Amino acid sequence: MSIVIAIDGPAASGKGTLARAIAQELGFAHMDTGALYRASAYELIKAGMSARDKTDALKAAQILVKKIKAADMPDDILGKPSLREDRIGQKASIIAAYPKVREALNILQQDFAASPPRPYKGAVLDGRDIGTVICPDADVKIFVTADDEVRAQRRTKELQSRGLDVTYEAVLKDMRERDARDTARTAAPMKQAPDAYVLDTSALTQAEMLSQALEIIREKVQI
Ligand code: CDP
């Protein structure tokens, strides 16, 4: 049985960076599940479909699933830098509220957790509903948080370093909108699993964040 580590949390909380670092440290495979929603939104826009239409959104998710299954290197599809743009994040969060879209993407995530690609001996998944819906039996669950302002600063820096013309105010506004939508939706809302450890990263460096997370993990599982 593969060891599964579930990392959830709001936008720009540090969960993606943390999940990648944990995976590297432990020799586990990593899946950024937000990229599945972002890549579905990308397919939707590319096909000229509407995020307000549930059927269009499902079609886009199905196109993505087909592409991933057929791809030798799914990372090429999910790692596209343009997926990180805010307009994609907003559309991703609109279509992520449709139960059928979630259903279409859930299987990929659950398969990855149950059988991570060889030679990895475990899986780290980061998202919004990993500890609650995708892997309720995960060996370790961490819910990563940080203050709104800190998160908006981080995201602004990230986007600016990619050459995007964004302001802190606009990023903060979009982020709050997306968090509110992700928390309020009825389908797999973003919430902390009752058995999750909360890690507030507001005042932590990346190295501190990793060492605290590893401490939590090593308390729960023998690695
Ligand atoms: O990187 P950031 O935290 O800003 O976002 P992300 O993890 O790439 O996710 C983009 C959007 O996809 C989120 O705002 C959610 O609406 C949705 N999402 C989700 O519903 N469930 C997940 N497991 C992951 C992402």
Image: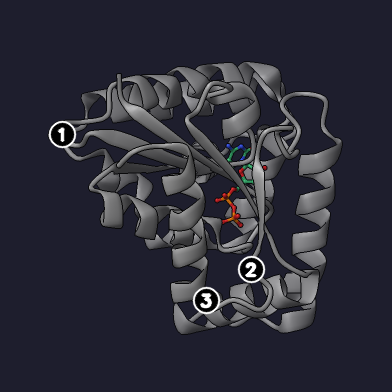
Q: Is residue 55 left or right of residue 118?
A: right
Disc ID at residue 218: none
* Residue situated in front as seen by the camera: 221 or 62: 221
From the viewer's perspective, is residue 213 above or below residue 93? Answer: below
**Which quarter of the figure is the N terminus placed in?**
top left
**Label 3, on which residue?**
158
Coloring applied to the structure: one colour
Which circle's residue, 2 or 1, is located before the other in the chain? Answer: 1
From the viewer's perspective, is residue 80 above or below residue 54? Answer: below
Give x and y (percent) for residue 17.
45, 62
The response on whether ligand 1 sits within 8 Å of label 1 is no
Label 2 – label 1 distance at C-alpha: 35 Å
Taking the spot 44% from the left edge, 52% from the top edge, the residue there is 19
Discs 2/1, front? 2
Taking the spot 33% from the left edge, 50% from the top edge, the residue there is 23
Give x and y (percent) for residue 132.
65, 27
**Label 1, on which residue?**
72
Q: What residue type is labelled 2?
A: Thr
Q: Which amino acid does label 3 sit on?
A: Glu
Classify 10 Å Cα crowding around label 3: few (below 14), some (14-19), many (20 and above): some
Q: In this view, does 112 lie to the left or right of 196?
A: left
